[in-house]
């Protein structure tokens, strides 16, 4: 029987080469040598690896960097304020077009599973959400997009946002976000976390908050979120950024890490943006500004890395490349040995897939969502070193990108 597609001479993760067969949406056989197929692709010994996963990115803000005032202070606070005017001018079409461009860039770089945070507040209303949901529908055959309703401007200090979060879930959002540090007091911060957890529980959706994206060592929303998750029995909770955890003294940080492990919170670090925004006003030596990746991993937590920003007011770079994100994470988190390089790779792969709760792997029967790298890339380390875009990108059995450019990631 002929298969739908055969990948000739692909390099498997164990180093062997084999012909890999795909039928329909799934991997049919990892060693189909001698089989026939309706279509064949030549891997020529290039690495076959599961598709990248970007579990934290902001598609609604992508590509607006050059329209905004300069972020003179280089801080998160100024970046948030600088976007307000542009956000008022958003239209659904504008957001849909930019989000679609960012999705396409992800796909060409080998990432077809994306979790995006989308601003929900009284400035932009539901316009960003509607634009991203339309982009998701337009790209539905090519990429899986999860949408997190994200109250960037606060909940307590932006009255009406809690209602908008519920409306966002009605209109297609998949999860509730949060930005508890962006409130005026610790009491308001806790009220923010409570409000978001209430909505998540009511709608039965995951929670994925931006937590303590600050260098302030007194920021305390992370431990509050973990404790509330335990008390309420909320299981699918993710905390992004968590920069303040790195600013705590070691004894307090250890206590918080233990609490996170008890709650089973998934952790996401965003080194591209946070290397740029955090630590700016430190004297020397300047901190790296990312969370405690090593200690969180040692505690057994799932730790992933996300692109976060693509040319917006927070970060003027970014090209939807999970290889670049992994490489920056490797530098920021001291990932150097072969085992540590594997960690960097998994932070934009298996670990990010756990955050999104999507299938990941190359087993027979698994979704044929994978990348085929050029022949010069035989291992994940080769991919990190070369920064090379996959030659073929497959999503559920369909070839969704073929890259002729083989010497660099696709911008
Ligand atoms: Zn973010």
Image: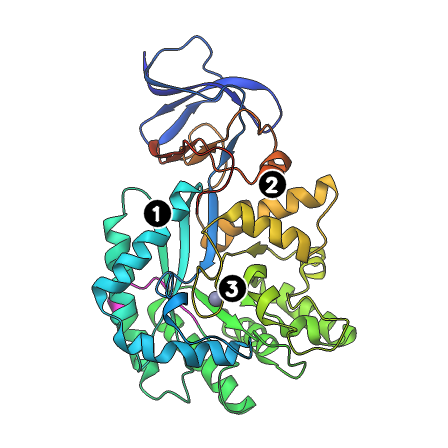
Most extreme residue toward the top is 34
In the rendered image, which residue does mark 3 sit on? 238
- Cα–Cα span, label 1 and label 3: 26 Å
In the rendered image, which residue does mark 2 sit on? 384
- Kindly indicate the quadrant of the structure image that contains residue 148: bottom left
First in residue order: circle 1 vs circle 3:
1
Residue 125 at x, y percent in the picture:
27, 77
Does residue 383 sit above or below 30 in this rendering? Answer: below
The boundaries of the magenta stretch are 170-177
Q: Are marks 1 and 3 in contact (CB under 8 Å)?
A: no
- Cα–Cα span, label 3 and label 2: 26 Å
Residue 388 at x, y percent in the picture:
52, 37
Q: Is residue 180 visible?
A: no
| Residue found at x 33% / y 69% | 203
Q: Secondary structure at mark 2?
A: helix
Residue 174: in magenta span: yes
Q: Are marks 2 and 1 in contact (CB under 8 Å)?
A: no
- Which of the numbered marks, if any, corresponds to residue 104? 1
Does residue 373 sit above or below 188 in this rendering? Answer: above
């Amino acid at each position: 029987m002929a298969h739908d597609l055969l990948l000739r001479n692909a390099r498997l993760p164990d180093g062997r080469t084999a012909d890999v067969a795909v039928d329909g949406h799934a991997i049919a056989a990892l060693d189909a040598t001698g089989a026939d197929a309706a279509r064949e692709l030549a891997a020529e010994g290039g690495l076959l690896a599961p598709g990248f996963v970007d579990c934290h990115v902001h598609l609604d803000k992508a590509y607006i960097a050059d329209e905004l005032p300069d972020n003179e202070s280089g801080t998160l606070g100024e970046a948030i304020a600088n976007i307000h005017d542009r956000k008022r001018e958003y239209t659904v079409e504008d957001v849909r077009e930019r989000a679609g461009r960012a999705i396409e860039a992800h796909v060409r770089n080998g990432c077809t599973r994306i979790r995006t945070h989308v601003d929900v507040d009284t400035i932009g209303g539901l316009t960003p959400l509607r634009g991203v949901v339309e982009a998701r529908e337009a790209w539905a055959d090519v990429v899986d997009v999860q949408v997190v309703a994200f109250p960037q401007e606060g909940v307590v200090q932006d009255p009406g946002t809690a209602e908008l979060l519920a409306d966002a879930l009605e209109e297609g959002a998949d999860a509730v976000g949060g930005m508890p540090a962006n409130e005026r007091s610790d009491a308001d911060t806790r009220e923010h976390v409570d409000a978001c957890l209430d909505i998540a529980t009511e709608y039965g959706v995951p929670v994925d908050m931006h937590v303590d994206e600050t260098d302030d060592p007194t920021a305390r929303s992370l431990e509050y979120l973990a404790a509330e998750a335990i008390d309420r029995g909320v299981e699918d909770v993710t905390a992004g950024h968590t920069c303040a955890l790195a600013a705590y003294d070691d004894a307090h940080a250890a206590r918080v890490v233990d609490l996170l492990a008890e709650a089973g919170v998934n952790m996401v670090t965003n080194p591209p943006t946070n290397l740029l925004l955090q630590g700016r006003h430190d004297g020397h030596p300047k901190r790296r500004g990312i969370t405690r990746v090593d200690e969180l991993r040692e505690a057994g937590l799932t730790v992933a890395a996300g692109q976060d920003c693509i040319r917006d007011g927070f970060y003027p770079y970014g090209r939807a490349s999970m290889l670049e994100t992994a490489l920056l994470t490797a530098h920021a988190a001291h990932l150097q040995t072969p085992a540590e390089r594997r960690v960097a790779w998994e932070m934009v792969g298996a670990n990010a897939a756990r955050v999104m709760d999507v299938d990941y792997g190359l087993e027979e029967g698994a979704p044929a969502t994978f990348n085929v790298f050029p022949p010069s890339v035989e291992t994940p380390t080769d991919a990190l070193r070369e920064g090379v875009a996959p030659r073929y990108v497959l999503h559920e059995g369909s070839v969704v990108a073929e890259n002729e450019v083989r010497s660099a990631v696709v911008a």
